[in-house]
Amino acid sequence: MSDVAAAALVEPPLGLLAELTHRCPLRCPYCSNPTALTRAAEELDTATWARVFGEAAALGVLHLHLSGGEPTARRDLPALVRAASEAGLYSNLITAGVLLDAARLEALAAAGLDHVQLSVQDAEPGAADRIGGMAGGHARKLEAARLIRAAGLPLTLNAVVHRQNLDRLPGLIALALELGAGRLEVAHVQYHGWALANRAALLPSRAQLDAAAATVEAARAAHRGRLVIDHVIPDYHARRPKPCMGGWGRRVLVVSPAGKALPCHAAESLPGLQFPSVREASLAAIWHRSDAFNRFRGTAAWMPEPCRSCERREVDFGGCRCQAFALTGDAAATDPACALAPHRALLDRALGEAAAGDARLADRAFGRPPPPRRRGGHGPRRRGSCRRAR
């Protein structure tokens, strides 16, 4: 098949996740960024990011998510927002908020920023600062939220939840209302990177999830028209997997701080795949012709049973490739989140470990790998199974 014919079969991505930096003042023990982080000197420069934004718009991307790490650690962020605006992209800043002040936010709004997604670690200040590893961080986030709303920007509150804070979900909903957020994302931890190393201390119980689901439904009814609440059951308690990122290479394109183009933010954890760099190829060429993007795209010959003959194969696409590899050692395996997966017992065993384990968290620090994981409940270990090579 010619390149032109192949390109015609692939729909354009709708979103670009631009990981501007891995630098971050917080030390969240569930960070799903790679455990081998990109240094500032290796990051793409302003001009390259601006070119990438223009190529993304030409490719068909509508939404740009400016993320990290902590994207406000980049001094050129207003220039990047301006480049996105000039390219015609809707820009969403995903931030911890602890580095924002009135002057910085005014500059971002003037540059054309469209929306801000602010993360919080807890509704209780002490617990939030403990999880984030930054004294006074929660207070800074509250001030950032007020500045965001004062600037007239729409605000989404991103509440990262897990076993140690899920019982305080009512307080997080109240906080979203108090801060004037239009949307609350109840975001369960994704178990990659440091989160996988801390899984036994972070996985919520079934009882916690049931209580949280009831809390969300009651809040949706009580605050309809004022607050939209997004909530999805985490994979470890699900019966069927989710179509990760809408399916491998189908809806979202990720560019790492160093310029690697990826189908998802954890894709570099998979061995044997060479991900192209935006320094050397255009986004269009990468999206349509990259071997790495085509490796797990659609439901082709890569898909094993029971996925290949499953009626949901065009719905969930076999689940998450990175999770399948982290748990089984095989990126092509059926995601163990599926109840029909041959390796489903790995998730059940992990839930048992979490129920029997303690709540101690391994502290996260830049440049230091997570502690070794025990083999039990994780499947066979292979080099690179929970960290991205650089």
Image (spheres, rainbow, N blue to C red):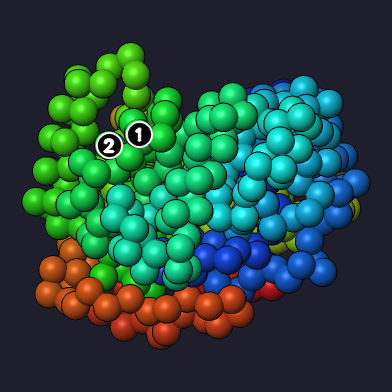
Question: Residue 357: x and y, percent?
Answer: 17, 76
Question: Which SS class for mark 2?
Answer: helix
Alpha-carbon span between mark 2 and mark 1:
6 Å
Question: Residue 364: x and y, percent?
Answer: 47, 76
Q: Quadrant of residue 61?
A: top right
Label of residue 327 in the image: none
| Residue at (15% x, 57% y) in the render | 205
* Circle 1 crowding by C-alpha within 10 Å: few under 14, some 14–19, many from 20: few
Q: Which residue is mark 2?
A: 174
| Residue at (73% x, 71% y) in the render | 39
In the image, is residue 157 above or below residue 67?
above
In the picture, which quadrant includes the C terminus? bottom right
Question: Residue 369: x and y, percent?
Answer: 52, 81
Question: Residue 337: x and y, percent?
Answer: 29, 51
Task: Please give the count of numbered marks on the rendered protein.
Answer: 2
| Residue at (41% x, 50% y) in the render | 120
Amino acid type, residue under disc 2 in the picture: Ala
Q: Nearer the viewer, residue 236 or 220?
A: 220
* Circle 2 crowding by C-alpha within 10 Å: few under 14, some 14–19, many from 20: few
In the picture, which quadrant includes the N terminus? top right
Q: Quadrant of residue 174?
A: top left
Contact (Cβ within 8 Å) of mark 2 with mark 1: yes
Q: Is residue 98 visible?
A: yes
Question: Which SS class for mark 1?
Answer: helix
| Residue at (76% x, 29% y) in the render | 110
Q: Which residue is mark 1?
A: 178
Q: Is residue 347 visible?
A: no
